[in-house]
Image: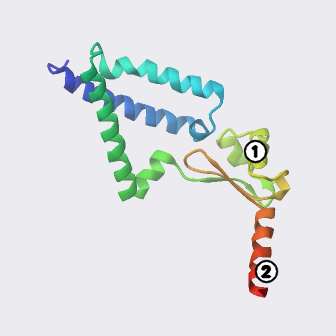
Amino acid sequence: MFDNPYIHIIISTTGVYLFIILALRVLGKTELAQLSITDLIFVLLISNAVQNAMVGADTSLGGGILAASVLFVINFIFKKLKYKFPSLRKVLEGEPVILIHNGKIIESNCQKNNISKEELLQAIREHGSHTIEEVDSLILESDGNISVVSNEYKHHSVRRLKKRKNA
């Protein structure tokens, strides 16, 4: 299709990059940060599957370096664009979602993001709390990570502030 094989690599690599961003965006945030063993295998296989689409028959060092360089440049450009245009960030990455508020699970948000009660409990334990009722907020961040703010944290913070005022 293209007379110059390097133009082919640039265009193919750009297309694969855009496809993977779209696929991850459609599949949801949890695919990014909460990797299980099957998710890790999936990511490794995807990278292998799209390699030929990016470089085609060119298995040379130059072709590989060009494809990697294009990925770095595209990623750099997207980071600058997301910083300059916050609305683009929302489209590409989504927004944080509250899954627990004041010790109560927000079922609709959990269902939209395919988060089970067991996954919520695991995240709560990982952040040092024991029960859902102890959690003020559990937030699924736009990068797929989970943030937990618990009553214990709030009580410790209030105690520290009172001690500082009394000292």
Q: Secondary structure at mark 2?
A: helix
Q: Is the residue under label 2 in contact with that under label 1 (CB below 8 Å)?
A: no
Disc nearer the start of the sequence (1/2): 1
Structural crowding at the residue carrying mark 2, measured as other residues with C-alpha within 10 Å and reported as few (<14), some (14–19) or many (≥20): few
Q: Which mark is residue 163?
A: 2
Residue 81 screen position, x and y as percent: 35, 52
79 or 88, which is in the foreground?
A: 79
Q: Residue at x 44, y 32 (%)?
A: 20
Protein image colouring: rainbow
Three-letter residue code for mark 1: Leu
Mark 1 or 2: the one toward you: 2
- Residue displayed at 45% across by 36% down: 22
- Residue 48 x/y as whole percent: 45, 19
Pointer 1 residue: 120
Nearer to me, 19 or 150: 150
Measured in 3D between alpha carbons, the distance from the residue under mark 1 to the one under mark 2, in whole angstroms, is 33 Å
Return the x and y of residue 113 as percentages of the image width and height.
65, 42
Where 116 sits versus 98, above or below?
A: above
- With 158 as the anchor, is 75 left or right in this view? left
**Tag on residue 69?**
none
Q: Residue furthest top?
A: 57
> In the rendered image, which quarter contains the N terminus?
top left
Q: Is residue 65 above or below residue 130?
A: above
State the residue lying farthest toward the bottom. 166
Please name whichever residue, 157 or 104, is drawn nearer the observer in this view of the structure: 157
Element at label 1: helix
Q: Looking at the picture, tell me which residue is in the foreground, 166 or 56.
A: 166
